[in-house]
Structure formats: C-alpha cells, structure tokens
Amino acid sequence: MSETAHRPVGRRAFVLGTAAAAGTAALAGPLSGTARAAAFGWSDDGSNYVVDTGANLVFKVSKTNGDLTSLVYRGVEYQGYGGKNSHIESGLGTSTVTLTQSGSTILISVTYGTLRHYYAARSGENNIYLWTNKADSSVTATRFILRVKKGLFLNDEPDSYTYAPTTIEASDVFAKSDGQTRSKHYSRLRVKDYDHIGWTTGGVGLWIVRSNHEKASGGPFYRSLLRHQSADGGGLYEILYYGQNQTEAERFGLQGPYVIALTDGGAPSSALFPGTLTTPWADSLGLAGYVGASGRGRVAGVGITGRDTAHPYTVGLANSTAQYWGSARASDGYYSIPGVLPGTYTLTVHKDELAVYTTTVTVAAGATTTLNTIAIPSSNDPSNATAIWRVNDWTGTPAGFKNADLMTYAHPSDVRAAPWTGNVVIGSGTETSGFPCYLWKDVNSGITIYFRLTAAQAAAAHTLRIGVTTAYANGRPQVVVNDTWTSAIPSPPTQPSTRSLTNGSYRGNNHTFTYSVPASAWLTDPNAYNTLKINVVSGSGTTSYLSAGTAIDAIDLLA
C-alpha cells in the first residue's frame, strides 16, 4: 500500500492499486462493466476504507464496526436512511476491520467475536460480493440489510407500506385507505422462485443477488421477507436465518457470496445468480469456512418414474449443516444438483411441495454421485388413493382454494379477499375454488361439506383425510358428521410457533389428519346429503385472524 494511502481523501482522490492488476481487471470478473481501470483502488479516509471499483461504483466500509456507510453509483449516494447504515443484523459494534488487495480483488474483512463478514470488490465491476460466517449462536446475525435512501425507488408493491399508514397487526402489517394491505413480509416468493431482489427506476437498478442458501434453513419452498419500503427509505435483505414460520434448526458456517449489484436499470447479470456464479478468484482469499469448487461434489439422477406430470417436481438435499435443491426435468425427471459440500444427505423428492419419496445419498469432493432411476411408489402420493370424493389435489400447498394466491402477498383482512365463509357441495364443480384456504377458530370454524353416498358406501366405515401445510397456535381440525358423530380432538403436529397465515406464508410442516368414520355415522338415504363440519380446535391463539388456525392442502373421503 502506498504511504500516502493514510491521508484523508475526497471522493475523487483515491490511491490506486497496482497498475498491472488494474489494467487487466476488467477481463477477470463475471460482470465487467465499462471500466475506469486507472481508478481501481482503495484509500483510508480516517473513519472508513474507501473502495473505487474502477467502474461506476464507490463504497465505504467503517473501520470501527464494518458497516457499509456509503454506496455511490454514478455520483449518487444510495446508502442509508434514518441515520442508519447497512450492516449485519442491526450493526455489530466495535470490530476488527482489515483490508487486503490481491491483484484485481480488494477484500475487507470484519471480525466480531466468532463472526466473520467480508466485502469484496473486483476491478471494473459495479458489484460488491459479500460473505458472512456465523460460526455459532454466540453472535446474533440473521440477516444483512442494505438500507437505501428515501425517495429513490418509491413504489406501491405488496411489500411496500409507503402509502399504508394504518397498522392492523403487530407493528409490521398495514392497511391503505382503500383497504389493501401492505407488509415487508409480503414478498410472494419462495426461495427457489427468485435469484435477485431489488428495484429499478428504468435508469438505475439496485439489487441483492441471493446466495445459494446452503447454510440457510427451511428448504426450497421457504418464504421470508426480502425487501421493504416506506416514506423513510427502503431495505433489501439477504436472510441468513429467518425465524418466522421456520421449520428447521439454524445452520452455521459461511454463507455467500451474495451480491450487491448496481445496473443501468436492467436486472443483474445471470452470471451472478446462485447456481451460475463461480468465484475461483476467491479461492485464495482466506475466507473462514470457504470451500471452492474443487472441494465440492454433485448429485445427478437419471430420472424419476411414478410422477404426476401435471405437477413440477423438486429434488432436495439436506442435513444438519447444509441444504440444496434442483428441479426435475418434466420429460423424464432427470435432475442435477452441483456445488454440494461433502457429506451424507437426506434426498427428498417433492411433488409441488409435498414430499413423496426420501432416501439417503453421500457426496464426495470432486465427484458426481449418480443415482439410478427413482421409482416413486404409488402409495407415496395420497392423490393415488381411491376416493369417494376429494376436494383439491394433494400438493403440499393450499393452491386452488379460495384466496390461496392472495395470501402470499396480503393480510386475510384485505379488501380483495373473498369472504372466508364457504360451505361447499360435492359435485357442484366449485368444491375447491369455493372452499377457503385457511380456517380459523374465531373466523370460519364450522365450515361444512355436503355430499351424497350410495347405499353401499353408506353401509361401510370410511377413512377421512384432511391435509394441512402449517398451523398457527396449534389450530387443528376436529370433524362432526351429520351432527351425530364427533371425532376425537387430534394431537397437534409439530408446527412453527410464530405467525404464518397473516404474514404471507402457508409453509410449515405438511401433515395429514386421518379420521375413521363408522358406518353408523352415515345417512342411509342415497338422496340425502351427509354433512361434514370442520371445526378448528385449540386452547391457544387470541382472536380473529390471530386465533388458532390452519392452512388446508386437500380433503378426501376414501372408498
């Protein structure tokens, strides 16, 4: 480093990196912009390390606590609102912050107790690469938040509450004057549905490209908050561990890279996306917990039979230290999951979001574990059971039920929601679309299904199944048949303890309740309608949409 680098400098007066490295840097990264190679370098302004990427991006990192204190793109400051910086969690406090330059890469390392956090810049790129290693539970670090100045990307999306001044739940769900609801929880997206999150004005785009989430929790269908915006400013998130409606224990270790990417209005380059991004340039940086491509393996399967081709299939890998997933090809079920850390994993095949097959697989560094064709037994998919009647298909989701799509980006009280009532008649053709996706003890408990049975069907006992995808406050279904037979109250399955149904997520632990209904419960007249009343029972919860509740997957009466 030049001895002059210790001088406080203005935004334009930067100490340069090595000329040779700067001259070739624009060729080295996955997203090289129009480089100002001579400007690539860093300086110390006394309080911050100041990095010029040699493109159009200049950023600062506090030498005291590792906060990102400035993010200037094409001369405009984007970082910060409410006097707050961008950082891990709500800020780490006094940390050890160091900077090193290796050729065309500048790395800033932040150490806070057992936590390690990193910012990397590449010459000629308008990107900041970040890694976070939470080694244990001694340090609270569950997110990185990029705080963005107010007024730059105003919008009225579901996860924005700029124009929603009325609080309707906790301190994070709001209502507009027209009755539409807004919350930072309302992202619509599962983890597998997005590669990046952010905003664009048409002339400038600001994004966080997510990591591969190998050390996150919840699997491919998990939903967490991704961004928020209000009149005070906006936030973009990389969630390292999110406790809302969480189904798995926290994993520890290095997560990343995730990328802060600035563009001239378009989406970030797909070269930065998880599953596409490669970082051989980071192999020698000394990141704690880093495992390069050569230390990873791949799982590939030649195909999956026994699939219902009307539905997508996802193959997931998970153990206590890592998680991965990939889509099965629609034509034959082929799948490939690269970049897997060595170890033994549970492999799960999902029909939509419903687990229909599991096995174990072992992965070795530098090798591909090839699996023969997986044959899903017919009995593993509940849709294959012969039913007298069925409401909705079994997918592990409430998709198809009334209000199901809306509930991933709105509160149940939203003016756009259809009434939460919904008695239905089997054979009407609207059994699924007319039945509400969620049932609550204090809102719509007691919804009834009407159906006829033939004399032969009414002469026999039958099994009733109700599938759920999550529950709030231990809400679970107790059924009453023809007001004469009442089931026992089932034990509550293991479900997340936090809010779910009101903050955009139906994803918990899929569970099937079964009820053995005796023949004596049925009406013997084949022209008469039997009634199945579904009550929600629990001693927990409060009132209205925070009373005990559950999300429905499917309901059927087996032959």
Image: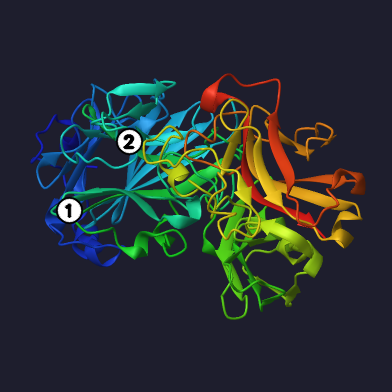
In the rendered structure, find residue 54 and report the number of the disc placed on it. 1
**Mark 1 to mark 2: distance in Å?**
44 Å
In front: 74, or 3? 74
The reply to whether the C-beta atoms of the residues labelled 1 and 2 are less than 8 Å apart is no
In front: 281, or 217? 217
Q: Amino acid at mark 1?
A: Gly
Query: Between tags 1 and 2, which lies in front?
Result: 2
Asked where in the image residue 391 lies, by quadrant, the reply is: bottom right
SS at circle 2: loop
Task: Where is residue 246? Give x, y as percent.
Answer: 59, 37
SS at circle 1: loop
What residue do we see at 42% from left, 55% from top? 194
Query: In the image, is 409 to the left or to the right of 315?
Result: left
Q: How crowded is the residue under tag 1: few (<14 C-alpha within 10 Å), some, or many (20+)?
A: many
Q: How crowded is the residue under tag 2: few (<14 C-alpha within 10 Å), some, or many (20+)?
A: some
Query: In the image, is 102 to the left or to the right of 163?
Result: right
| Residue 151 in sight | yes
Q: Quadrant of the N terminus?
A: top left
Task: Check the image and report above or below for 130 versus 93.
Answer: below
> Which of the marked residues, 1 or 2, is nearer the chain's N terminus?
1
Q: Amino acid at mark 2?
A: Gln
In the rendered structure, find residue 180 and report the number of the disc placed on it. 2
Task: Check the image and report above or below for 182 versus 215.
Answer: above
Task: Where is residue 163? Give x, y as percent.
Answer: 23, 31
Q: Quadrant of the C terminus?
A: bottom right
What residue do we see at 18% from left, 48% from top? 57
Task: Where is residue 271? Give x, y as percent.
Answer: 35, 64
Colouring method of the image: rainbow
